Image: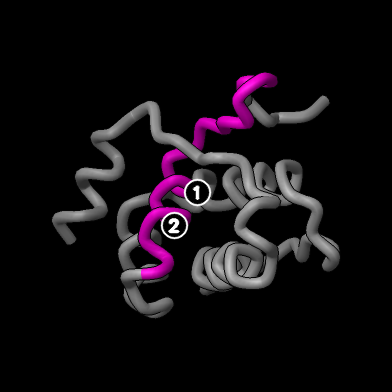
């Protein structure tokens, strides 16, 4: 069963992390984006968002299951690479439901 929560007619997917990355990738460098996201989102949030991204977009590469220390950073780099390598019109619009998570990432 897919974990994608989306509006069928409007191509909107709810995920705070992916919404943040989608909206900040053009204005924040990759290292800062990874640092902000790892300090704001849990390892589980990052892994779930990566899975959701791969389910939401046709990605040529297979999803890599990361392990060991630094896995969150490597998962975030994978997510950022998908955003950079896939045409923007291939993505749904990622939106945030819990805006408090996004506010926390902006204050770091």
Residue 58: image x %, image y %? 80, 52
Q: Residue at x 65, y 65 (%)?
A: 82
As drawn, the label of residue 18 is: 1
Relative placement, left or right, of 44 versus 98 is: right
| The C terminus sits in image quarter | bottom left
Q: Residue at x 42, y 77 (%)?
A: 30
Judged from the image, the secondary structure of the residue bearing numbered disc 2 is helix
As for residue 66 lying within the magenta part, the answer is no
Residue density around tag 2, few if under 14, some if 14–19, many if 20 or more, within 10 Å:
many
Judged from the image, the secondary structure of the residue bearing numbered disc 1 is helix
Q: Does residue 30 sit above or below 99 in this rendering?
A: below
Q: Which residues are magenta?
A: 7-26
As for residue 23 lying within the magenta part, the answer is yes
Relative placement, left or right, of 61 versus 30 is: right
Depth check, front residue: 106 or 42: 106
Residue density around tag 1, few if under 14, some if 14–19, many if 20 or more, within 10 Å:
many
Asked whether residue 86 is in view, the answer is yes
Asked whether residue 71 is in view, the answer is no
CB under 8 Å between callouts 2 and 1? yes
Residue 9: image x %, image y %? 66, 20
Q: Residue at x 60, y 43 (%)?
A: 48
Relative placement, left or right, of 1 versus 95 is: right
Reading the image, the residue beneath label 2 is: 21
């Amino acid at each position: 069963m897919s974990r994608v929560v989306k509006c069928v007619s409007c191509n909107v997917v709810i995920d705070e992390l992916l919404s943040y990355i989608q909206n900040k990738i053009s204005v924040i460098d990759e290292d800062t984006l990874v640092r902000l996201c790892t300090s704001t989102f849990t390892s589980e949030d990052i892994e779930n968002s990566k899975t959701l991204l791969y389910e939401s977009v046709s990605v040529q590469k297979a999803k890599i299951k990361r392990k060991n220390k630094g896995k969150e950073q490597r998962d975030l780099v994978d997510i950022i690479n998908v955003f950079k390598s896939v045409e923007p019109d291939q993505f749904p619009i990622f939106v945030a439901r819990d805006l408090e998570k996004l506010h926390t990432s902006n204050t770091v």
